[in-house]
Image (tube, coloured by chain):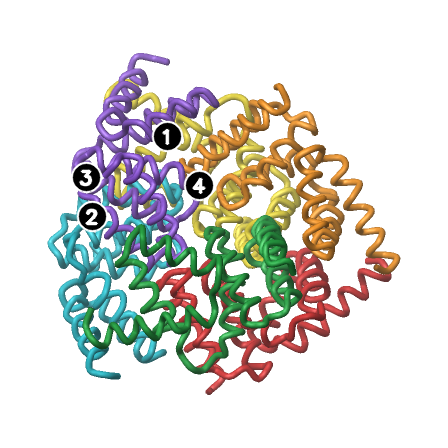
Chain colours: A orange, B yellow, C purple, D cyan, E green, F red
Amino acid sequence: MDVDSDSRYEKGLRKLEEIHTGIGKDVMTRLRSACQDFEELTTEFAYGDIYSRPGLDVRTRQLCTIAALTALGNGAPQLKAHINGALNLGIDRQEIMEVIIQMALYGGFQCAQNAVFLTAEVFEERGV
Amino acid sequence: MDVDSDSRYEKGLRKLEEIHTGIGKDVMTRLRSACQDFEELTTEFAYGDIYSRPGLDVRTRQLCTIAALTALGNGAPQLKAHINGALNLGIDRQEIMEVIIQMALYGGFQCAQNAVFLTAEVFEERGV
Amino acid sequence: MDVDSDSRYEKGLRKLEEIHTGIGKDVMTRLRSACQDFEELTTEFAYGDIYSRPGLDVRTRQLCTIAALTALGNGAPQLKAHINGALNLGIDRQEIMEVIIQMALYGGFQCAQNAVFLTAEVFEERGV
Amino acid sequence: MDVDSDSRYEKGLRKLEEIHTGIGKDVMTRLRSACQDFEELTTEFAYGDIYSRPGLDVRTRQLCTIAALTALGNGAPQLKAHINGALNLGIDRQEIMEVIIQMALYGGFQCAQNAVFLTAEVFEERGV
Amino acid sequence: MDVDSDSRYEKGLRKLEEIHTGIGKDVMTRLRSACQDFEELTTEFAYGDIYSRPGLDVRTRQLCTIAALTALGNGAPQLKAHINGALNLGIDRQEIMEVIIQMALYGGFQCAQNAVFLTAEVFEERGV
Amino acid sequence: MDVDSDSRYEKGLRKLEEIHTGIGKDVMTRLRSACQDFEELTTEFAYGDIYSRPGLDVRTRQLCTIAALTALGNGAPQLKAHINGALNLGIDRQEIMEVIIQMALYGGFQCAQNAVFLTAEVFEERGV
């Protein structure tokens, strides 16, 4: 890992630290253990390059990610981690639910339902 | 149409009026002409029931819709209408681009690319 | 909840009652407990507005839903509930299997396979 | 092509003949010209093996295909051909619209909207 | 089952035998028990007709299947079976990981992550 | 752009140069004109970081991308560019068709059909 990509990685770690605790960190730890290269590429690119970009606040970024993962319906562990991350950022639980409810319009009611169930799990695990 | 569903429809029309002009209105007009019932169900439910809910501001709702339609990659005319709607709401063109760029992470680079092209079309049509 | 939306909700509940028992009701009960608003929106719109429309018999509606959920492959609990609902409506287990097999053509063999496994689970749970 | 696969092909052609005219036949002709092997595999398997199976009537099969292609939203030319095929089989235009409207629940409103537009095109081309 | 379709089935079984052991065979055994017709259609068409075609080596076919199932993200049991099948064919574990990592570009990071986790499970179960 | 990210970008450009001509280059030029940042992120990450990784030859990478884009069915311009790229790398047109035909099993026949049509267009444009 050369100097600069190390700094992209460190920048990514700081962004990850800002958003994720518990569930989200576990996903990244399991990912590093399963494939270290992919954990590094994810940290560098997703968190170091994309989430760290200016021009959009981190809370809106987080809600847009929840929107997309809800509508796509193919990443339950990642959606759970990002719901948890949204709560870490101080996003209101009602705002999260509103985004998910709205996704019934684009990803279908089945996807919104499954995301509601995941959200309820996260709320319960955090004792919200 | 009974009294209440008329008011859901009117509520939906007001919300549509708030968000959409040009492109978005054309989609709804074409929809009404192709299938009046579905236009009414869409206006009542999507705009009267969902987009009119409190608990999340209309700008964040709009960006979440752009996120989902970008990531799903199966609704180009609707995505174009909602990008136009975002500009109507005063959302900055950079914010729209940031949401779309972020979607490369969840819907793939091909979906983000296609959404970037659509956005450039909307910007050009509006002379932004 | 105003008068009319109450009647859309009641109409939805009657349609839900007609289709779902056991598995399907459990999904709606869990949904209400996780997010009451979304349970109400689902009951009102999906069951009160859409499934209650004339112009297509409830059995064909049920098989079309099984087709879509099989092909999309992102709503296993909902697919299971609708397979159970189809049996409640007196749809033959062979008809259900035929719809699922046909979906290999549009959603891929992996989606049809997963739906066959879910169907076998429902049949076993009902002692069919 | 050996004797039996020829008969699967002929069985497929007869089923294709039963369902498709105009739009649907054009897709298969263009497909044969672009890749003869794939046209033969499609005719043999999709039409000879699957659509020719007993246990589900051809009209319900056709509506289930329209449901799936609407909800997936990634096969516009094929959806258009199958809407046309449904009309050939004597399926009522309202039944087709009902299936498509219902798909807003599973594939999202954008997919149902796009299918409504395609259906209107088919109706217009046939002068329905 | 007539003579020729029996030979397509036998051809399919030989191809299955070449690729799958353990996990993959279990999926087919469970499938036969849940719906014998669909197991036969799968063996005949997927393995007898498609995977047995000349013009592309079996290793590249296997990696392309892993690419597609990773990117679609809706067939975890089938993806696991095909990762196992790839190892049976002597494909290097690094090549499998490279295909999956590349799929972050098209199916999203969530799909690539989930496939990395499944791959790690297969490696562990085989003691790789 | 700092020193290292410039070298990731240059590495990406060299890889792009190796794979793409005509169609593929046009997509990147249009992308740069629509959103320079996203063109840079794509070149750096997709081509500089991912396609340039060792451990899998560029031809297999190209066929896996064709597999994924065919099966997802939501990136026609990108699929067309990658089919063209495959021919640039000396991949046989039959190998490309085999990958696409195989994708009928995972993405559905509609997606494989649409990819066959795109491939025929590319072949014709190149006079293959």
Disc number lying in front (4 or 3): 3
**Whether marks 2 and 1 lie on the same chain:** no
Q: Kindly report the distance in space between the C-alpha atoms of the residues bearing marks 1 and 4.
A: 13 Å
The reply to whether the C-beta atoms of the residues labelled 4 and 2 are less than 8 Å apart is no
Image quadrant where one finds the N terminus of chain A: bottom right
Kind of residue at disc 3: Arg
Query: Circle 2 marks a residue in which chain?
Result: C
Give the residue drawn at x 66%, y 42%.
Answer: A27
Is residue E53 at least partly visible in the picture? yes
Identify residue for label 2: C95
Q: Tell which residue pokes out farthest to the bottom in this image.
A: F127
Three-letter code for the amino acid on which mark 1 is drawn = Phe
Instruction: Kindly identify the amino acid type of the residue bearing the numbered disc 4.
Output: Tyr
Q: Please, which chain is the residue tagged with disc 4 on?
A: A
The disc labelled 2 sits on which kind of residue?
Glu
- Dot placed on the residue nearer the N-terminal end, 2 or 3: 3
- Marks 4 and 3, how far apart at CA: 25 Å
Instruction: Work out how far the residue at label 2 is from the one at label 3, CA to CA, in angstroms.
Output: 11 Å
Q: How packed is label 2: few (under 14 Cα within 10 Å), some, or many (20 or more)?
A: some
Instruction: Tell which of C81 and A91 is nearer to you.
Output: C81
Read off the residue under disc 1: B45
